[in-house]
Amino acid sequence: MEGPTPVSALIHAATMVNAGVYLVARCNPIFGAAPGVMVVVAAIGIFTAVLAASIAFTQTDIKRVLAYSTISQLGYMFAALGVGAWTAAIFHLMSHGFFKGLLFLGSGSVIHAVGDEQDMRKMGGLARKIPITYVTMLIGSVAIAGVPPLAGFFSKDEILGGAFKSGFLWVWAIGFVVAGMTAFYMFRLMGMTFWGPSHVDPEVEQHIHESPTTMTRPLILLAIPAAALGLLIGFPPESGLLHQWLAPVFEATIAAGGRTEAAYSFFGIDGGLAIVTTGLVAIAIIAAWRLFGVDMPAIGLHAEPRPDQVREVSARRGLDFLYRGSAAKWWFDDLNNLLFVVWGGRLAGAVWWFDRVVIDGTVNGVGTVTTQAGLRLRRVQTGHVQNYALGIAIGLIAMALGYFLIAVR
């Protein structure tokens, strides 16, 4: 779904797309009573998270990267619901609303600065030219990547920790990988947009300037909770203000499940998981910075490599198919077109023909027959008495003839 950037920031980051997460969380007694369904929710969520993250890897439209990032983070939230980490899911919903709203509005500021251009391959070197947009988007990127102590770190850490301690090791393993993928594609976006030499059209570049305060002020206001929300309501982990607020909502379901957790221990499994995840995120950020923030002669400088260059490099590594699949969004758009536009269109055409010819034809045919019969039958009413007398006589003869035939038998 495409729309103006402020609309994306509002309903695609914080409200409309999160309705399903809120629904499942509010229906926690129902879902908690069906463990099998919870596993399905977790599976769909974590599959969505890794699939959307893999698509965001290769997108070149700045807003499209953020859109697939939103899908991936929604998958994270559903995975949390599926493993019973109810509060962590709502925590991530809240923190995601702030830093993803910030990133969407920041992308709008970038697009405004470069003359309505959305292709990141035609950007680069914008950090010095639009510093407020750059710093606020950097805060949002660090937050969504899960770097401590920003908001995304606390909510993601609780989701992964909840999955691990609940025995959903496969959810934790995939979520762990997705955490690294998220950090990579977000700093790929930052590198292609703000770092390295400029690839902006020379005619546009001389007009690049920071957005007006009506656009930058919301970025600053959103950057504050994106950075500090975790410390404000999520610290100490698993017992912060948010957990206290939501305890009455989820405590009955958690108790009915018979699962009790030990207190959060930084020097135990919780701290170990947090350190490992943060290490992976750091590696992914460094890799993205290395690939898209500094010179890489093998595949081009800073900006997105040309398709022929990517194919040359990925073919040597056996990754050509994966790159093409990610860039093509794993052919979901093609599948959607085939199923709903081509085949669906033909089925709709057949149903329309049946409705028009058979259904409407039958109804219209009955009406036509009735009308024509009435037009012909009214000719019997001539207004002449002799014709009526003749009709009566013929009727009497027919009745007499019928009675005679019956009597003879």
Image (spheres, rainbow, N blue to C red):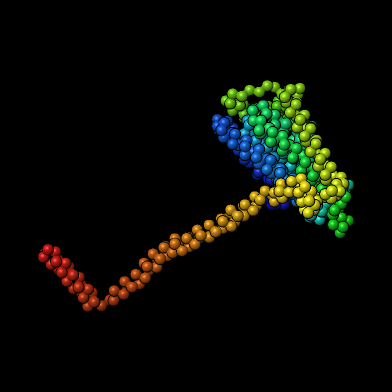
Q: In the image, what residue occupies the spot 20% across and 73% down? A: 394
Q: Which residue is nearer to you in this view: 11 or 238?
A: 238
Quadrant placement of the C terminus: bottom left
Q: Where's residue 77, x and y in %? A: 66, 37
**Is any part of residue 226 visible from this angle?**
no
Q: In the image, what residue occupies the spot 72% across and 50% down? A: 324
Q: Which residue is nearer to you in this view: 364 or 389?
A: 364
Q: In the image, what residue occupies the spot 77% across and 39% down? A: 183
Name the side, left or right, on which 205 lies relative to 185: right
Considering only vertical position in the picture, is 229 above or below 105?
Answer: above
Q: Where's residue 197, x and y in %? A: 88, 50
Q: Where's residue 232, x and y in %? A: 76, 30
Q: In the image, what residue occupies the spot 56% across and 58% down? A: 345
Q: Where's residue 407, x and y in %? A: 11, 64
Q: Which residue is nearer to you in this view: 301 or 376?
A: 301
**Is any part of residue 341 visible from this angle?**
yes
